[in-house]
Amino acid sequence: MAIPSKYDASKVEDKWYAYWLKNNYFHSEVDHTKESYTIVIPPPNVTGVLHMGHMLNNTIQDVLVRRARLLGKNACWVPGTDHASIATEAKVVAKLKEQGISKSDLTRAEFLQHAFDWKDEYGGKILDQLKKLGASCDWERTKFTMDPEMSESVIKVFVDLYNKGLIYRGYRMVNWDPEAKTTLSDEEVIHEERQGNLYYLQYKIEDSEDTLTIATTRPETIFGDTAICINPNDERFTHLKGKRAIVPLSGRIIPIIEDEYVDLEFGTGCLKVTPAHDENDKNLGDKHNLEVIDIFNDDASLNSFGLHYQGKDRFVVRKEIAKELEEKGILVKTEVHTNKVGTSERTKAVIEPRLSDQWFLKMEELAKPAIDAVLGENAEVNLYPKKFENTYRHWMENVRDWNISRQLWWGQQIPAYFYGDGKEDFVVAENIEDALVLAKERTKNDELTTKNLRQDEDALDTWFSSWLWPMSVFDGIRNPENEEIKYYYPTNDLVTGPDILFFWVARMIVAGYEYKDAKPFENVYLTGLVRDKQRRKMSKSLGNSPDALKLIDDYGADGIRVGLLLSAPAGNDILFDEDLCQQGKGFANKIWNAFRLIKGWEVDASLPQPATAKIGLEWYEAKFQKALAEIEDHFSKYRLSDALMAIYKLINDDFSSWLLEIVKPAYLQPIDKTTFDAIIEVLENNLKVLHPFMPFLTEEIWQFIADRTPEEALIIAKYPVIKDFDAQIIADFDFASDVISGIRTIRKDKNIAFKDAIELFIIDAEQNPKEFDAVIQKLTNTATITTVTEKVEGASFRVKSNEYFVPISIENIDVEAEIEKLSGELKRAEGFLVGIQKKLSNERFVANAPEKVLELERKKESDTLAKIQTIIGSLNSLK
């Protein structure tokens, strides 16, 4: 089969991916004769498409999995997608809206049918896109967080935790997303600094001419005020104690209460209390038995308590009410004010604090084993980089009860069944039949039927399904003693972003210890965020995120993988530069050309092996083993960028630039078989260490080298074994390579053609490693190397304490080229001299410049004059 002159990634990638799939290399089954190596994919949203973050994360996972296969492990990489309740429901609602269908017009079952139809049509595209990247996932194991068996596991865990007293229903102040119309956990709220206003409003005092002034950032919430609070120690407001205030516009009478909670220094010292819309106000309200008035609808428009503003959005009302209050003399003044505003991580809507009945999971006790697992004396879970341990500690030691209910239909429906109208009239069970049995026991009413039961409408938080992921993908919740969970769990490595260290990673650790009494994984590699060259986070809105699939088309999957990893130092943000992908593509081309060079040599079995080839191969073997040990060390510390760079230098510099030059036969001459076979073995070892990073290119070359059976494919080849190596031969070659570089520099400077042999003389030659003399001679066309005690006329250079001389014969020099070069140097030197002499002839400069500066300028003048004389002498000798 003819070897193409150029490497064409577009023709190679689909071919080998199909071959790998056909031969089932990605699939794993329980095999107790092999050590398992397991990774579970961080399940991307079913709504997602491949972006730069996914590409980086999954490239790293694929590198780890492919390397594990080469090391002989039973590698299992489980793919899947997350149902992403808020994001997906929003997309389905929007699609229905385009068709003139409102969610409110549908039953839950009808809506879910639309959602599953949408998922079947659009969902999971990202997994197909990962295949373009080369991801070697066990596609037969693909999971979806709402697959029936996955949902069954989630429901089972909910019921178990409820029965243990860890899940409870509570009327609490929650984070309300008015766009998604659901509650969010604290961790799903992003706090952003925003500039707004502080409004100073005047409240009248009942049966009095007195007034008081409060400062608020939210004048629209006055309709929910149920008290004014003052600090009992504030002498300014002694006269207000025991009195009542009148809420502007609504005219409601509210008490003036006293509490030391009020900050004497902030605002006016008088605080409006709105228990329904602020957590601190709610606490004050509970303490002082205040009325709670919720003024908002679920979309954050005002309800009937908002009077003539009913139905208007809160931000519209803020502007309009400020104007009305000003016109009526109630708004005293407005100041610019910066404060932190909570926004929804998913929809970006401003969060509204709201009182609501929700389901919560008690986290304090559950978190303790997970804290010890990462931070304890006998820590079992390692975070890379270690710096994230502090973040983990802060979150876990300050953990709050997890709000696990969402006002959505897309997700696992909470398995609570109400049998009456009271808030406590419910039972929790895995299905309605079990619930009926419990309800009959609770009510002592055997006449109850399933028709008397009403299941809670809310769905569970998406994270409540994905926190079980390492267990549920192996059916470890429903069947805790099955062979797969026992073999594959705990998993080995988790690769994910630090932004979900708490959302997902910490919660998986919590669930692992609760349900398997074991860690879910051993190592967590936290990647950085992918940013552009201006350090901006890549996003669609900024338009700075390149099309991932187009990049693959332009540079090949291997080129992208190399480009991403070269710019991805462990745990730090990635400043993505497309030039690095070009470098990756260029690296692929260089390896391809090196392979074509080797395969182009004619082999003669009768030829003996030259000494140059023998010593060159011995050196490269030592160099390879040294690199192999470094690569292993980098992998052990999850420094994949450094591991790739070590391989890059080994192949690009040591193999392509040095070894191939050392063993290359003379022009149109054959190579001996011993050397050729050794070079093929070297190339194959190079391909093995490079394969995890550049799987397509390496498999293509591997299959071209020889006819291979499916059992001999590179993807399942045996990784090179680390052995002891000769460090001295590496040091000796480094010395010799400096000599070669010195000679090459002289040839270049003196325009001595390579076809013209030269002589080399050495002073103090005991440091010169003789083993490489033949290599020096071959790579520099040096006829003889002679040791001398005196300097030899000609060009010279030093390597350590050795001095080397190359006699310059006019016959060896391209005279015209040398004259042209020297003439250019003379012109530049004369121009430089003019500048110096002009400065030194300036009386003002000479009078004012420090003596040291003058000394320096005079030395420059004398050095330049000497250089000019040397150049003139060289020119005269050539004429």
Image: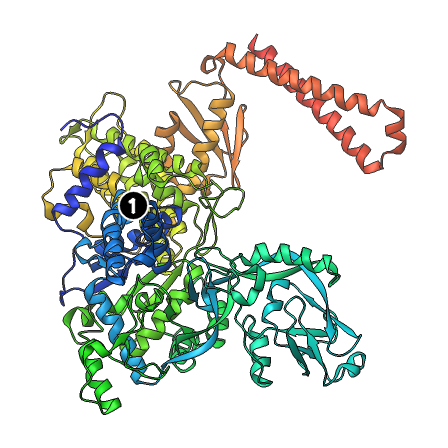
Q: Residue furthest top?
A: 879
Residue at left 20%, top 84%? 448
Front position in the image: 749 or 110 = 110
* 242 on left or right of 849: left
- Count every numbered label the image shows and give the total: 1
The answer to whether any part of residue 335 appears in the image is no
Three-letter amino acid code at the position of disc 1: Leu
Give above or below for 705 relative to 97.
above
Front position in the image: 702 or 851 = 702
Q: Residues within 10 Å of mark 1 (few under 14, many from 20)?
A: many
Quarter of the picture containing the N terminus is top left
Residue at left 55%, top 59%? 314
Quarter of the picture containing the C terminus is top right
Return the residue at label 1: 690
Q: Residue 691, how many percent across, how many down? A: 26, 46
The answer to whether any part of residue 564 appears in the image is yes
* 241 on left or right of 840: left
Q: Residue 815, how many percent across, how many down? A: 50, 11
Q: Residue 18, how many percent across, how many down? A: 16, 42
